[in-house]
């Protein structure tokens, strides 16, 4: 018997998908990094002050992450290409409309709601597209895809500074909206992974395929493919491959875990599933019953919120210590340039030393807390640029492994759907960014210094690293004890 195994390409067209994700993120995700330069200064010059600017950004991030309630079900129904294209259109529309904003509620409606919702669709859709094409090179692929965000964050401050010198606020934001629309080009590269699955022979030699009387096609696929591939398509693929081999009998072997999940979600004839159970099943709310998963998303949310608050307050901190606009843009570009370098190197280093995504994230958060504390103490331009570059390099470890940490959890817990887990993670980040994020903005009020805000953020990063490290040690000891052989009865007697 010969088995034809269909596997993810782990390359091939997947690299074009990586390029598409980089293009989609380049002109869209980078707008958050320049919010302080564009919207922050514009809003803070009004009666709303820095707290009003922080509220606009925090509500935008809340909408971005609360869209996770929608992205899970949407990605189960529609392809990442369609979802990404819709997200790009919403983000560009929000930017263009915000160029005419004159009051705070205008910014809430345009930037916070439209652009926030658009970014909330782009992030998980592009990640799902890349994640479905790769297996062993997943970390490297995601890092390269997110390098598009780093590239945009590197050049966007310089572009915005030049635009502000040539145009006013309205012209600058209009051009940013046009740049955002280029993400549609990247979305077009997200071809369905079913078109590029590799078919390899397992067991017998390839030459024996001609003499084999039975061929079993086994679909070795990740959960992302299962979400993207319908049962109808599976049947047509088996039929097509069976037609290529004369007098063969094909059977489709599917993933038992997915079948079990479908059986659980299927109503029985004797009763109907209540609306609440339907919602719970669609969103996979059973994940919230796992303490490890809850601990993971809380840690990810705290680090994410800290990064959002830092990206907005950092330009104001540099202005407070006397840096000009050009010097401020240079520090931000140095931070983002180092971030790009790290996205190429950190995944390779982590794979070489064989540490997981969550462990890499933990070390990144720990070192980032120390680096930001050092950065906050610098006052000279050369030292600040160097410290900014160091923070950017270390920050990449937390950015790259945000979604990969959730993906790693889902791989270790076969009953978990990645799309729903990512959605719940985004909702958690939305809650934290509106509560903890606003606290970071108010923390400046007692002293009037942004240094205290950065130090408080570093303390939260340190708390995440210590709590995760403690949990990992406890779980490792439990596994070690459970693996020990039980004492025999004879020895005990």
Image (cartoon, rainbow, N blue to C red):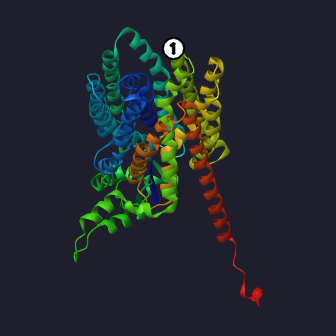
Q: Exactly how many numbered labels are in the figure?
A: 1
Dot 1, crowdedness within 10 Å: few (<14), some or many (≥20)? few
Query: Which of the pair 229/108 is nearer the observer?
Result: 108
- Say which residue appears at 30% left-offset and 40% top-offset: 83
Could you tell me which secondary element the residue under label 1 belongs to?
helix
Residue 415 in view, yes or no: no
**Is 204 left, or right, of 284 in this rendering?**
right
Outermost top residue: 166
**Is 202 left, or right, of 191 in this rendering?**
right
Query: Which of the pair 474/211 is nearer the observer?
Result: 474
Name the image quarter holding residue 351.
top right
| Relative vertical location of residue 161 with respect to residue 271 in this rendering, above or below | above
| Relative vertical location of residue 75 with respect to residue 375 in this rendering, above or below | below
- Say which residue appears at 57% left-offset and 35% top-offset: 452
Residue 457 in view, yes or no: yes
- Say which residue appears at 54% left-offset and 38% top-offset: 140
Image quarter where the C terminus lies is bottom right
Q: In the rendering, at what x and y percent does residue 60 appear?
A: 36, 37
Q: In the rendering, at what x and y percent does residue 148 appear?
A: 46, 29
| Relative vertical location of residue 133 with respect to residue 213 in this rendering, above or below | above
Query: Which of the pair 70/385 is nearer the observer?
Result: 385
Q: Which residue is disc 1 drawn over?
A: 326
Outermost front residue: 446
Q: In the rendering, at what x and y percent does residue 458 appear?
A: 59, 40
**Is 353 left, or right, of 434 in this rendering?**
right
**Is 204 left, or right, of 378 in this rendering?**
left
Outermost bottom residue: 493
Q: In the rendering, at what x and y percent does residue 454 appear?
A: 56, 35
């Amino acid at each position: 018997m010969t088995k034809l195994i269909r596997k993810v390409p782990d390359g091939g067209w997947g690299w074009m998908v990586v390029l598409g994700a980089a293009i989609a993120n380049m002109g869209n995700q980078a707008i958050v990094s320049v919010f302080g330069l564009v919207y922050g200064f514009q809003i803070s010059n009004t009666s709303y002050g820095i707290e009003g600017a922080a509220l606009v950004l925090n509500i935008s991030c809340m909408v971005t992450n609360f869209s996770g309630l929608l992205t899970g079900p949407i990605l189960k129904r529609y392809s990442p290409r369609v979802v990404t294209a819709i997200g790009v259109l919403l983000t560009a529309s929000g930017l263009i409309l915000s160029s005419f904003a004159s009051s705070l509620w205008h910014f809430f409606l345009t930037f916070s709601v439209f652009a926030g919702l658009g970014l909330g669709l782009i992030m998980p859709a592009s990640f799902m597209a890349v994640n479905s094409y790769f297996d062993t090179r997943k970390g490297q692929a995601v890092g390269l895809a997110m390098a598009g965000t780093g590239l945009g964050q590197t050049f966007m401050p310089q572009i915005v500074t030049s635009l502000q010198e040539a145009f006013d606020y309205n012209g600058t934001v209009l051009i940013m909206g046009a740049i955002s629309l280029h993400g549609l080009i990247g979305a077009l590269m997200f071809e369905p992974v079913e078109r590029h699955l590799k078919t390899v022979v397992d067991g017998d030699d390839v030459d024996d395929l001609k003499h084999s009387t039975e061929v079993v096609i086994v679909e070795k696929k990740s959960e992302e493919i299962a979400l993207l591939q319908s049962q109808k398509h599976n049947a047509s693929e088996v039929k097509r491959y069976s037609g290529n081999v004369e007098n063969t009998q094909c059977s489709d072997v599917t993933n038992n875990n997915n079948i079990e999940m479908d059986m659980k979600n299927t109503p029985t004839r004797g009763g109907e599933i209540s609306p609440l159970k339907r919602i719970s099943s669609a969103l996979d709310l059973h994940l919230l019953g796992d303490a490890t998963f809850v601990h993971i998303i809380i840690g990810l949310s705290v680090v994410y919120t800290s990064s959002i608050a830092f990206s907005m307050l950092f330009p104001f901190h540099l202005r407070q210590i006397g840096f000009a606009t050009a010097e401020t843009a240079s520090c931000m570009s140095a931070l983002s340039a180092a971030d790009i370098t790290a996205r190429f190197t950190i995944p390779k280093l982590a794979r070489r030393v064989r540490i997981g995504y969550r462990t890499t994230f933990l070390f990144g958060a720990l070192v980032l807390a120390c680096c930001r504390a050092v950065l906050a103490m610098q006052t000279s331009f050369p030292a600040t640029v160097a410290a900014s570059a160091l923070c950017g390099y270390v920050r990449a470890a937390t950015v790259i492994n945000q979604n990969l940490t959730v993906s790693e959890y889902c791989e270790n817990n076969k009953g978990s759907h990645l799309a729903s887990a990512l959605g719940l993670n985004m909702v958690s980040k939305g809650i934290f960014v509106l509560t903890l994020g606003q606290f970071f903005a108010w923390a400046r009020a007692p002293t009037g210094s942004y240094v205290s805000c950065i130090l408080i953020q570093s303390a939260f990063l340190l708390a995440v690293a210590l709590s995760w490290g403690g949990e990992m040690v406890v779980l490792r000891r439990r596994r070690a004890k459970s693996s020990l052989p039980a004492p025999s009865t004879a020895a005990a007697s």
